[in-house]
Each structure stands twice: as structure tokens, then as C-alpha cells.
Image (spheres, rainbow, N blue to C red):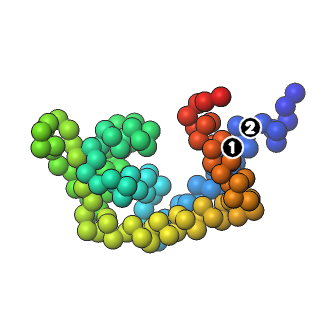
Amino acid sequence: MIVINDCITFILGKAYQRVHAELKSRLAPFGLTAPQYAVLAGLWEEDGRSSAQLREQLVMDSATITGVLDRLERDGLVNRFPDSTDRRVVRLRLTDAGRALRDGVQQEIAKLNADIVGSLTPAQADELMGRLRSIAKGHR
């Protein structure tokens, strides 16, 4: 019999709760939620992506990303526009306000990442990230 404290799903769930609560706290001064941050981060990597490309990278369903984009657009951080060659495709562009958030938010996320892995060696942190990516992708 597995005791709850040895159950991987319980441990991962508790770790997620702790990290997500800290992420919410650190994003609050910027007026962002975690999904909004994820969308902005994807556009900071490559502005002008289609909503479908971003949805695929972030593994969000269509309804979720639509709601996030609605709020980002309402807040003046992102604009949507049709693709020049295929009007069925919706492209996303950061506004000046969306670009202006980048440095401050990314610095805060870097601090959060450092705080989370602060008790690990760099090699252990790299191994943890690799293993978490593998779990997230469903690789064994």
C-alpha cells in the first residue's frame, strides 16, 4: 500500500500548488494571471504568431486561449489581426504596453525560478527540469 506522502501525484500536486501560488503573487503587481503571462511570454519569444501556433506551444484549448486573448486585448496588451495570406488565421501582435511589461515580468520569473531551485546544484536543477519536461510530454 502506498502512503499519501509517497504518491507521486500527491507530491507533484502539492509542489504545483506551492509554485503556482508564488507565481500568482509575483504576477499580481503586473496585473497578470499565469495564463496571461504564458501567452505574453510566447509573444515575447516571437511576436506575430498565430493564435493556433501559440495554443499548440502552450497546450491550451481553444476556449481558454480565446478568453485569455480577450482579456489581454481588453487590457491593451495584445492586438489580433487577420493573416495577410489567409484570413482564417488570426495573428497576434504585442502592443507597446505588452512589450513594456517584458523586462519586469521576466526578471520576476527569473527570480522565482532561482528561488524554486535554490537548494539544488545547477546539475540537479537541470536534471529536474529535464525530468519534469519528460513527464509533461508523457515520455517514459
Q: Which quadrant, please, contains the C terminus? A: top right
In this rendering, the answer to whether 60 lies above or below 121 is above
In this rendering, the answer to whether 138 lies above or below 113 is above
Residue 13, quarter of picture? top right
Report helix, strand or loop for mark 2. helix
Q: Position of residue 68 (x, y in %)?
A: 35, 50
Residue beneath the point at 25% across and 63% down: 95
Q: Are marks 2 and 1 in contact (CB under 8 Å)?
A: yes
Report helix, strand or loop for mark 1. helix
Q: Nearer the viewer, residue 11 or 114?
A: 114
Mark 1 is surrounded, within 10 Å at the Cα level, by few (under 14), some (14 to 19) or many (20 or more) other residues, namely: few
Instruction: Please indicate whether residue 85 sits to the left or right of residue 15 in the image.
Output: left
Instruction: Please indicate whether residue 94 sits to the left or right of residue 133 in the image.
Output: left
Amino acid identity at mark 2: Ile
Q: Nearer the viewer, residue 10 or 133?
A: 133
Q: Which mark is residue 56?
A: none
Location of mark 2 (residue): 8
Q: Is residue 70 visible?
A: no
Instruction: Please indicate whether residue 138 sits to the left or right of residue 33 in the image.
Output: right
Location of mark 1 (residue): 12
Q: Is residue 130 visible?
A: yes
Residue beneath the point at 34% across and 47% down: 67
Residues at marks 2 and 1, CA–CA distance in whole angstroms: 6 Å
Q: Position of residue 30 (x, y in %)?
A: 43, 69
Mark 2 is surrounded, within 10 Å at the Cα level, by few (under 14), some (14 to 19) or many (20 or more) other residues, namely: few
In this rendering, the answer to whether 136 lies above or below 100 is above
Q: Position of residue 39 (x, y in %)?
A: 38, 52
Residue 137, quarter of picture? top right
